Amino acid sequence: MTIRIKVPATTANIGPGFDSLGVAVNLYLTLDIIKPANTWYVHHDYGDTIPHNEQNFIVKTALKICASLPPHEIKVTSDIPLARGLGSSSSALLAGIALANVLGQLNLTSQHILEKATQLEGHPDNVAPALLGGAVAAYYDNSTVYHASFDIDHSLRFVTFIPHYEMLTETARAALPASLSFQNSVQASAIANTLVAALTHHDLNTAGRLMELDQFHEVYRQSMVPHLQEIRQVAHQLAIHGTFLSGAGPTTITVTTADKVAPLIQAINQLNLSGDIHVLQIDPLGLQITGE
Ligand SMILES: Nc1ncnc2c1ncn2[C@@H]1O[C@H](COP(=O)(O)OP(=O)(O)O)[C@@H](O)[C@H]1O
Ligand SMILES: N[C@@H](CCOP(=O)(O)O)C(=O)O
C-alpha cells in the first residue's frame, strides 16, 4: 500500500495576529511515496521552475532532517497555489519533514516536527495549523513553540480571492518596519487578543470588525495589494465585515456565513479583478499520513 502524506493549506495572521494566528483550510498538498530508487525523483506538474531531483524543496527539507535517507521516487500533487499567501511553503516543508520521519523511522513527536518546521519557516502561524488542523495561536522564542488550538465556528465560509500574480513572502516581509512604538504595539496586540476571544465565542460581528483593524502588517503591504481595499468596500456594502490579507498576500479572505457567499461572490466578480474565487472551509485535521 502506498504511503500518503496529506497537508492542508493555511491562512496566517487572520488580520491582526501577525506571525501568531493561523487557520488550516481545505486545499491540500498530497505526497505519495512510490518506491525506492537509485536517485531522488519527484513527479509533479508545477512546471519547469520546480526541480524534479534532490534539489526539490520537499526533498531538500527531508534531507536536512536526515541526510542518510534512502532515495525514493515520490509524487506530489497540490491544489495550493504557490506564493499567494496560502502557506504553500509551510505545507511543502511539513511534507518534507513527515517524509523524513517515515523513511528514516525517526519517531519525531508532533512537538518536535512543529519546532523543526517553525525553525525552517521562521514563524509558526502557518506550520502550526497545517500540522494540527483548525485554528491555532502560537509563539516561537527561537527554541520552543508555545501553541494552543482555539475553537472557531466550523460552519464559517472563507471567500478567498486568489490574484493571478505571485508575491513571495520574503518580498512582502521586506516591506515591514523594523520596529513599532510602545503605544502601537499595545493597541495592535489588544486587537489580536480580542479577536481570538471573539472567535472562540463565535461572535462573528465583533471578530469580523477586529479582523479589519490590523496594525502590524496590512498597512505596509497595502500598496502591493490594492484589491484588498476594493473587496473590503464591496463586502461592507453587503454588511459583511471580516476581509483580510491571507498571510503575506496577495490572496484576500472574507470570513462570512453560508447565506452571504453568493451575493459576495457576485459583488467581487463585478470588480473585474484578475484572479479566481474559491469558497474554503476550515480543515479540522491538519497533516495526515495513511497507508503506513
Ligand atoms: N510543493 C512545493 N514544491 C516545491 N517548492 C515549493 C512547493 N510549495 C512551495 N514551494 C516553494 O515555496 C515558494 C513560495 O513560498 P512563499 O513565498 O512563502 O509563499 P506561500 O505564501 O505560498 O507560502 C515557491 O515559490 C516555491 O519555491
Ligand atoms: N506571518 C507571515 C505569514 C506568511 O504566510 P504566507 O502564506 O504568505 O507564507 C507574514 O505575514 O509574513
Image (cartoon, rainbow, N blue to C red):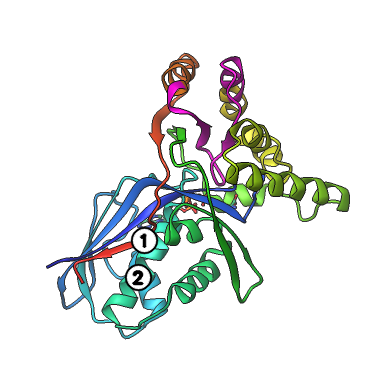
> Which quadrant is the N terminus positioned in?
bottom left
Q: Determine whether 196 is above or below 165 in the image.
A: below
Percent x, y of residue 195: 66, 43
- Seen in the picture, residue 112 relative to 214 is either above or below; the reply is below
Q: What residue appears at the point 55 percent right and 46 percent down from the top-left corner?
A: 247
Q: Residue at x 44, y 18 (%)?
A: 269
Name the residue nearer the viewer: 155 or 74: 155
Which residue position holds label 1?
Answer: 287
- Location of residue 211 (image quadrant): top right
Q: Over which residues does the magenta segment extend?
A: 232-259
Residue 50 image offset from top left, x and y in percent: 33, 56
Whether residue 21 is in magenta: the answer is no
Q: Is residue 179 above or below residue 242?
A: below
Observer-nearest residue: 207 or 121?
Answer: 207
Q: Nearer the viewer, residue 12 or 271?
A: 12
Q: Is residue 257 visible?
A: yes
